Image (tube, rainbow, N blue to C red):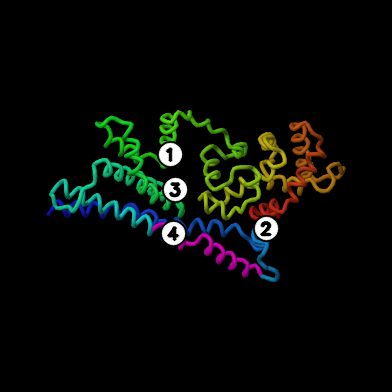
Amino acid sequence: MRYDFLIDSVCLLGWMLVLWPAFFYLIAKAGWAERRQRIFTNFTGAALRLYFGLYFPSLNIQGESDAQLAERFKKHYGCYYGRRHFIIPLLLLAAVAGLGMWGTAETLKTWQTQHGSFAWPPIILSAFVGAFTWVTSDQLDRLRRRDLNSGDIYNGAFRFLIAAPFAVALAVFAKDTVGIPLAFLIGVFPTTTLFTIGRRIASKQLGLGEDPAAGHSELEILQNIGKVNAERFYDEGVTTIAELAWTDPVDLAVRTNFDFNYVSDCMSQALLAVYVGERIKDLALFSLRGAQEASAMIDDIGADIESADATPEQRDARMALTQAAAKLNIDPKTLRYTLQAVAEDPYSKFIWNIWGPPT
Protein backbone atom coordinates (compact mmCIF):
# COMPACT_ATOMS: atom_id res chain seq x y z
CA MET A 1 0.00 0.00 0.00
CA ARG A 2 2.89 2.35 0.64
CA TYR A 3 3.96 1.98 -2.98
CA ASP A 4 0.40 2.69 -4.13
CA PHE A 5 0.29 5.93 -2.13
CA LEU A 6 3.73 6.97 -3.37
CA ILE A 7 2.85 6.28 -7.01
CA ASP A 8 -0.46 8.16 -6.74
CA SER A 9 1.24 11.11 -5.04
CA VAL A 10 3.99 11.41 -7.63
CA CYS A 11 1.51 11.23 -10.51
CA LEU A 12 -0.70 13.86 -8.84
CA LEU A 13 2.29 16.17 -8.41
CA GLY A 14 3.24 15.59 -12.04
CA TRP A 15 -0.28 16.56 -13.13
CA MET A 16 -0.10 19.75 -11.04
CA LEU A 17 3.33 20.57 -12.46
CA VAL A 18 1.98 20.47 -16.02
CA LEU A 19 -0.75 23.00 -15.17
CA TRP A 20 1.07 25.26 -12.73
CA PRO A 21 3.08 27.39 -15.23
CA ALA A 22 -0.06 28.54 -17.05
CA PHE A 23 -1.94 29.28 -13.82
CA PHE A 24 0.99 31.22 -12.40
CA TYR A 25 1.40 33.18 -15.65
CA LEU A 26 -2.25 34.25 -15.49
CA ILE A 27 -2.27 35.34 -11.85
CA ALA A 28 1.23 36.79 -11.45
CA LYS A 29 1.78 40.52 -11.89
CA ALA A 30 4.86 39.78 -14.02
CA GLY A 31 2.93 37.54 -16.42
CA TRP A 32 -0.21 38.16 -18.46
CA ALA A 33 -1.04 41.40 -16.64
CA GLU A 34 2.36 42.93 -17.38
CA ARG A 35 2.13 42.17 -21.09
CA ARG A 36 -1.33 43.75 -21.15
CA GLN A 37 -0.07 46.87 -19.40
CA ARG A 38 2.89 47.23 -21.77
CA ILE A 39 0.47 47.46 -24.67
CA PHE A 40 -1.86 49.90 -22.92
CA THR A 41 0.93 52.35 -22.08
CA ASN A 42 1.67 52.88 -25.79
CA PHE A 43 -1.78 54.20 -26.67
CA THR A 44 -2.62 57.87 -26.32
CA GLY A 45 -5.98 59.27 -27.40
CA ALA A 46 -4.64 60.16 -30.86
CA ALA A 47 -3.13 56.70 -31.31
CA LEU A 48 -6.40 55.04 -30.28
CA ARG A 49 -8.36 57.07 -32.82
CA LEU A 50 -5.99 55.97 -35.56
CA TYR A 51 -6.01 52.37 -34.32
CA PHE A 52 -9.79 51.98 -34.37
CA GLY A 53 -10.04 53.92 -37.63
CA LEU A 54 -7.50 51.69 -39.40
CA TYR A 55 -8.30 48.26 -38.01
CA PHE A 56 -11.96 48.58 -36.96
CA PRO A 57 -13.44 51.18 -39.33
CA SER A 58 -17.00 49.98 -38.73
CA LEU A 59 -16.89 51.25 -35.14
CA ASN A 60 -18.36 54.70 -34.59
CA ILE A 61 -15.96 56.58 -32.34
CA GLN A 62 -16.96 60.08 -33.35
CA GLY A 63 -17.34 62.37 -30.38
CA GLU A 64 -15.71 60.00 -27.89
CA SER A 65 -13.23 61.52 -25.46
CA ASP A 66 -9.77 60.11 -24.83
CA ALA A 67 -11.02 58.53 -21.60
CA GLN A 68 -13.91 56.86 -23.43
CA LEU A 69 -11.54 55.57 -26.11
CA ALA A 70 -9.24 54.15 -23.45
CA GLU A 71 -12.18 52.37 -21.82
CA ARG A 72 -13.31 51.05 -25.21
CA PHE A 73 -9.81 49.70 -25.84
CA LYS A 74 -9.74 47.94 -22.46
CA LYS A 75 -13.05 46.23 -23.28
CA HIS A 76 -11.82 45.38 -26.77
CA TYR A 77 -8.65 43.81 -25.38
CA GLY A 78 -10.58 41.85 -22.77
CA CYS A 79 -13.02 40.56 -25.39
CA TYR A 80 -10.37 39.35 -27.83
CA TYR A 81 -7.41 38.51 -25.60
CA GLY A 82 -8.66 38.28 -22.00
CA ARG A 83 -7.86 35.56 -19.49
CA ARG A 84 -11.10 33.74 -20.30
CA HIS A 85 -9.53 32.52 -23.54
CA PHE A 86 -7.25 30.31 -21.43
CA ILE A 87 -10.13 28.44 -19.75
CA ILE A 88 -10.93 25.87 -22.46
CA PRO A 89 -7.30 24.98 -23.31
CA LEU A 90 -6.48 24.65 -19.60
CA LEU A 91 -9.46 22.36 -19.06
CA LEU A 92 -8.45 20.30 -22.08
CA LEU A 93 -4.84 20.05 -20.92
CA ALA A 94 -5.98 19.13 -17.40
CA ALA A 95 -8.23 16.37 -18.77
CA VAL A 96 -5.66 14.89 -21.15
CA ALA A 97 -2.79 15.08 -18.65
CA GLY A 98 -5.05 13.79 -15.86
CA LEU A 99 -6.10 10.72 -17.85
CA GLY A 100 -2.49 10.09 -18.78
CA MET A 101 -1.32 10.35 -15.18
CA TRP A 102 -4.13 8.07 -14.03
CA GLY A 103 -3.11 5.48 -16.63
CA THR A 104 0.52 5.87 -15.60
CA ALA A 105 -0.35 5.33 -11.94
CA GLU A 106 -2.44 2.24 -12.65
CA THR A 107 0.28 0.78 -14.86
CA LEU A 108 3.01 1.32 -12.27
CA LYS A 109 0.84 -0.14 -9.49
CA THR A 110 0.10 -3.19 -11.61
CA TRP A 111 3.78 -3.73 -12.29
CA GLN A 112 4.93 -3.07 -8.73
CA THR A 113 2.16 -4.29 -6.39
CA GLN A 114 -0.43 -5.98 -8.60
CA HIS A 115 -3.02 -3.55 -7.18
CA GLY A 116 -3.64 -1.67 -10.41
CA SER A 117 -6.74 -2.25 -12.50
CA PHE A 118 -4.85 -2.36 -15.82
CA ALA A 119 -1.42 -1.80 -17.36
CA TRP A 120 -0.35 -0.03 -20.51
CA PRO A 121 2.18 -1.59 -22.85
CA PRO A 122 5.67 -0.34 -21.93
CA ILE A 123 6.07 1.56 -25.18
CA ILE A 124 2.87 3.56 -24.50
CA LEU A 125 3.99 4.47 -20.99
CA SER A 126 7.42 5.46 -22.29
CA ALA A 127 5.85 7.69 -24.94
CA PHE A 128 3.56 9.40 -22.42
CA VAL A 129 6.42 10.07 -20.00
CA GLY A 130 8.45 11.51 -22.87
CA ALA A 131 5.56 13.81 -23.81
CA PHE A 132 5.17 14.81 -20.15
CA THR A 133 8.86 15.72 -20.05
CA TRP A 134 8.64 17.92 -23.13
CA VAL A 135 5.32 19.62 -22.27
CA THR A 136 6.39 20.41 -18.71
CA SER A 137 9.79 21.69 -19.81
CA ASP A 138 8.19 23.81 -22.53
CA GLN A 139 5.62 25.30 -20.14
CA LEU A 140 8.24 26.13 -17.50
CA ASP A 141 10.53 27.67 -20.10
CA ARG A 142 7.68 29.80 -21.45
CA LEU A 143 6.82 30.92 -17.93
CA ARG A 144 10.42 32.02 -17.40
CA ARG A 145 10.37 33.97 -20.67
CA ARG A 146 6.80 35.25 -20.07
CA ASP A 147 5.97 33.80 -23.46
CA LEU A 148 2.74 31.85 -23.02
CA ASN A 149 -0.59 32.08 -24.81
CA SER A 150 -3.64 29.89 -25.19
CA GLY A 151 -2.29 28.30 -28.36
CA ASP A 152 0.75 27.00 -26.47
CA ILE A 153 -1.56 25.23 -24.01
CA TYR A 154 -3.55 23.68 -26.85
CA ASN A 155 -0.25 22.47 -28.30
CA GLY A 156 0.60 20.82 -24.98
CA ALA A 157 -2.67 18.89 -24.95
CA PHE A 158 -2.19 17.94 -28.60
CA ARG A 159 1.30 16.71 -27.85
CA PHE A 160 0.04 14.30 -25.19
CA LEU A 161 -2.54 12.93 -27.63
CA ILE A 162 -0.09 12.20 -30.45
CA ALA A 163 2.74 10.84 -28.29
CA ALA A 164 1.61 7.20 -28.27
CA PRO A 165 0.67 6.93 -31.99
CA PHE A 166 3.97 8.50 -33.01
CA ALA A 167 5.97 6.22 -30.74
CA VAL A 168 4.26 3.06 -31.98
CA ALA A 169 4.59 4.10 -35.63
CA LEU A 170 8.25 5.11 -35.44
CA ALA A 171 9.28 2.19 -33.24
CA VAL A 172 8.37 -0.14 -36.11
CA PHE A 173 11.48 1.08 -37.90
CA ALA A 174 13.73 0.46 -34.86
CA LYS A 175 15.12 -2.71 -33.37
CA ASP A 176 13.07 -4.35 -30.61
CA THR A 177 15.75 -3.63 -28.01
CA VAL A 178 15.57 0.13 -28.54
CA GLY A 179 11.83 0.54 -29.14
CA ILE A 180 10.92 1.53 -25.56
CA PRO A 181 13.75 4.04 -24.96
CA LEU A 182 13.17 5.37 -28.47
CA ALA A 183 9.54 6.05 -27.58
CA PHE A 184 10.67 8.21 -24.65
CA LEU A 185 13.36 10.01 -26.64
CA ILE A 186 10.92 10.72 -29.46
CA GLY A 187 8.56 12.17 -26.87
CA VAL A 188 11.03 14.83 -25.76
CA PHE A 189 11.41 16.32 -29.25
CA PRO A 190 9.42 19.45 -30.12
CA THR A 191 6.20 18.70 -32.00
CA THR A 192 7.44 20.30 -35.23
CA THR A 193 10.54 18.10 -35.09
CA LEU A 194 8.35 15.02 -34.71
CA PHE A 195 6.44 15.92 -37.85
CA THR A 196 9.71 16.48 -39.70
CA ILE A 197 10.96 13.04 -38.62
CA GLY A 198 7.66 11.46 -39.62
CA ARG A 199 7.67 13.10 -43.05
CA ARG A 200 11.24 12.04 -43.74
CA ILE A 201 10.59 8.43 -42.79
CA ALA A 202 7.38 8.33 -44.82
CA SER A 203 9.09 9.92 -47.82
CA LYS A 204 11.90 7.37 -47.64
CA GLN A 205 9.57 4.39 -47.31
CA LEU A 206 7.24 5.58 -50.06
CA GLY A 207 10.05 6.70 -52.37
CA LEU A 208 8.83 10.28 -52.49
CA GLY A 209 12.24 11.88 -51.99
CA GLU A 210 13.25 14.49 -49.45
CA ASP A 211 11.27 17.64 -48.86
CA PRO A 212 12.81 20.65 -50.60
CA ALA A 213 14.96 22.77 -48.33
CA ALA A 214 13.15 25.68 -46.81
CA GLY A 215 14.30 29.01 -48.18
CA HIS A 216 14.86 32.24 -46.34
CA SER A 217 11.80 34.18 -45.26
CA GLU A 218 11.17 37.51 -46.93
CA LEU A 219 10.93 39.01 -43.44
CA GLU A 220 14.60 38.29 -42.74
CA ILE A 221 15.69 41.34 -44.74
CA LEU A 222 14.51 43.46 -41.80
CA GLN A 223 16.73 44.29 -38.86
CA ASN A 224 16.37 42.02 -35.83
CA ILE A 225 14.22 39.40 -37.59
CA GLY A 226 16.19 36.19 -37.75
CA LYS A 227 15.01 32.76 -38.80
CA VAL A 228 13.39 31.90 -35.45
CA ASN A 229 11.37 35.11 -35.23
CA ALA A 230 10.43 34.90 -38.91
CA GLU A 231 9.08 31.40 -38.24
CA ARG A 232 6.98 32.72 -35.35
CA PHE A 233 5.49 35.36 -37.62
CA TYR A 234 4.94 32.65 -40.24
CA ASP A 235 3.07 30.52 -37.69
CA GLU A 236 0.61 33.40 -37.27
CA GLY A 237 0.05 33.80 -41.01
CA VAL A 238 2.44 36.72 -41.59
CA THR A 239 4.79 35.63 -44.37
CA THR A 240 5.46 38.75 -46.44
CA ILE A 241 6.66 42.30 -45.91
CA ALA A 242 3.27 43.69 -46.96
CA GLU A 243 1.38 41.52 -44.48
CA LEU A 244 3.63 42.67 -41.66
CA ALA A 245 3.35 46.32 -42.71
CA TRP A 246 -0.43 46.49 -42.52
CA THR A 247 -1.39 43.94 -39.89
CA ASP A 248 -2.94 44.77 -36.51
CA PRO A 249 0.10 45.12 -34.20
CA VAL A 250 -1.90 44.48 -31.03
CA ASP A 251 -3.30 41.24 -32.40
CA LEU A 252 0.09 40.14 -33.72
CA ALA A 253 1.86 40.97 -30.45
CA VAL A 254 -0.63 38.86 -28.49
CA ARG A 255 -0.56 35.90 -30.88
CA THR A 256 3.22 35.78 -31.20
CA ASN A 257 3.86 36.85 -27.60
CA PHE A 258 6.48 39.28 -28.85
CA ASP A 259 6.84 42.55 -26.99
CA PHE A 260 4.54 45.20 -28.47
CA ASN A 261 7.43 47.62 -29.01
CA TYR A 262 9.27 44.95 -31.00
CA VAL A 263 6.23 44.22 -33.18
CA SER A 264 5.57 47.91 -33.87
CA ASP A 265 9.25 48.42 -34.75
CA CYS A 266 9.10 45.49 -37.20
CA MET A 267 5.93 46.97 -38.66
CA SER A 268 7.69 50.34 -39.04
CA GLN A 269 10.55 48.71 -40.94
CA ALA A 270 8.12 46.78 -43.13
CA LEU A 271 6.29 49.99 -44.11
CA LEU A 272 9.56 51.35 -45.50
CA ALA A 273 10.67 48.03 -47.00
CA VAL A 274 7.46 47.90 -49.06
CA TYR A 275 8.95 50.79 -51.06
CA VAL A 276 12.69 50.08 -51.04
CA GLY A 277 12.87 46.29 -50.64
CA GLU A 278 16.23 44.87 -49.60
CA ARG A 279 17.86 48.30 -49.91
CA ILE A 280 16.43 49.07 -46.48
CA LYS A 281 19.65 47.58 -45.11
CA ASP A 282 21.61 50.37 -46.80
CA LEU A 283 19.29 53.09 -45.48
CA ALA A 284 19.76 52.08 -41.85
CA LEU A 285 23.22 53.69 -41.93
CA PHE A 286 21.55 57.07 -42.50
CA SER A 287 19.01 56.86 -39.64
CA LEU A 288 16.33 55.43 -41.94
CA ARG A 289 15.46 52.13 -40.28
CA GLY A 290 11.73 52.36 -40.92
CA ALA A 291 8.63 54.49 -41.38
CA GLN A 292 9.10 56.11 -37.97
CA GLU A 293 12.53 57.43 -38.92
CA ALA A 294 11.37 58.36 -42.43
CA SER A 295 8.57 60.45 -40.92
CA ALA A 296 11.04 62.12 -38.58
CA MET A 297 13.40 62.96 -41.47
CA ILE A 298 10.59 64.42 -43.57
CA ASP A 299 9.47 66.47 -40.59
CA ASP A 300 13.03 67.75 -40.03
CA ILE A 301 13.74 68.57 -43.69
CA GLY A 302 10.71 70.78 -44.15
CA ALA A 303 8.94 71.71 -47.36
CA ASP A 304 12.00 72.75 -49.39
CA ILE A 305 15.24 70.76 -49.43
CA GLU A 306 17.14 73.58 -51.16
CA SER A 307 16.23 76.65 -49.07
CA ALA A 308 19.22 78.79 -48.12
CA ASP A 309 18.15 79.68 -44.58
CA ALA A 310 18.04 76.13 -43.24
CA THR A 311 18.26 75.45 -39.52
CA PRO A 312 21.01 73.15 -38.18
CA GLU A 313 18.42 70.40 -37.81
CA GLN A 314 17.33 70.83 -41.43
CA ARG A 315 20.93 70.80 -42.66
CA ASP A 316 21.64 67.55 -40.83
CA ALA A 317 18.49 65.93 -42.21
CA ARG A 318 19.28 67.09 -45.76
CA MET A 319 22.83 65.79 -45.48
CA ALA A 320 21.53 62.38 -44.40
CA LEU A 321 18.99 62.41 -47.25
CA THR A 322 21.66 63.32 -49.81
CA GLN A 323 24.05 60.63 -48.61
CA ALA A 324 21.27 58.02 -48.51
CA ALA A 325 20.24 58.92 -52.06
CA ALA A 326 23.85 58.57 -53.21
CA LYS A 327 24.02 55.14 -51.59
CA LEU A 328 20.92 54.09 -53.54
CA ASN A 329 22.22 55.83 -56.68
CA ILE A 330 19.09 57.95 -57.08
CA ASP A 331 18.33 61.68 -56.99
CA PRO A 332 17.76 63.14 -53.49
CA LYS A 333 14.43 64.60 -54.60
CA THR A 334 13.31 61.15 -55.73
CA LEU A 335 14.21 59.65 -52.36
CA ARG A 336 12.47 62.50 -50.56
CA TYR A 337 9.31 61.86 -52.59
CA THR A 338 9.46 58.18 -51.63
CA LEU A 339 9.95 58.99 -47.96
CA GLN A 340 7.08 61.48 -48.16
CA ALA A 341 4.83 58.68 -49.45
CA VAL A 342 5.94 56.48 -46.57
CA ALA A 343 5.32 59.23 -44.02
CA GLU A 344 1.84 59.96 -45.36
CA ASP A 345 0.73 56.33 -45.15
CA PRO A 346 -2.00 56.18 -42.45
CA TYR A 347 -0.26 53.20 -40.88
CA SER A 348 2.98 55.18 -40.65
CA LYS A 349 1.08 57.95 -38.90
CA PHE A 350 -0.22 55.36 -36.45
CA ILE A 351 3.36 54.20 -35.72
CA TRP A 352 4.42 57.85 -35.40
CA ASN A 353 1.76 58.34 -32.71
CA ILE A 354 2.60 55.08 -30.94
CA TRP A 355 6.24 56.01 -30.51
CA GLY A 356 5.43 59.64 -29.86
CA PRO A 357 6.62 62.42 -32.19
CA PRO A 358 9.26 64.69 -30.74
CA THR A 359 8.00 67.96 -29.28
Q: Which residues are magenta?
A: 65-90
Question: Which of the marked residues, 3 or 2, is nearer the chain's N terminus?
Answer: 2
Q: Mark 3 vs mark 2: give the one in front.
A: 2
Instruction: Pick whichever, 336 or 270, lies toward us.
Output: 270
Image: 182 above or below 91: above
Q: Mark 2 vs mark 1: give the one in front.
A: 1
Q: Residues within 10 Å of mark 2 (few under 14, many from 20)?
A: some
According to the image, label 1 marks what residue? 195
Tell me the distance, in whole angstroms, between the alpha carbons under discs 2 and 4. 28 Å
Tell me the distance, in whole angstroms, between the alpha carbons under discs 1 and 4. 26 Å
Query: The residue under label 3 is which amino acid type?
Result: Arg
Mark 3 vs 2: CB contact within 8 A: no
Question: Which of the marked residues, 4 or 3, is nearer the chain's N terminus?
Answer: 4
Q: Position of residue 201 (x, y in %)?
A: 41, 32
Instruction: Pick whichever, 207 or 226, lies toward us.
Output: 207
Question: Which of the marked residues, 2 or 4, is nearer the chain's N terminus?
Answer: 2
Tell me the distance, in whole angstroms, between the alpha carbons under discs 3 and 2. 31 Å
| Residue 145 marker | 3
Tell me the distance, in whole angstroms, between the alpha carbons under discs 2 and 1. 38 Å
Query: The residue under label 1 is which amino acid type?
Result: Phe
According to the image, label 4 marks what residue? 86
Quadrant for the N terminus in the image: bottom left
Question: Which of the marked residues, 3 or 1, is nearer the chain's N terminus?
Answer: 3
Q: Mark 3 vs mark 1: give the one in front.
A: 1
Q: Is residue 74 magenta?
A: yes
Query: The residue under label 4 is which amino acid type?
Result: Phe
Q: Position of residue 241 (x, y in %)?
A: 64, 42
According to the image, label 2 marks what residue? 54
Image: 217 above or below 101: above
Q: Residues within 10 Å of mark 3 (few under 14, many from 20)?
A: few
Residue 23 in view here: no
Instruction: Pick whichever, 303 or 198, lies toward us.
Output: 198
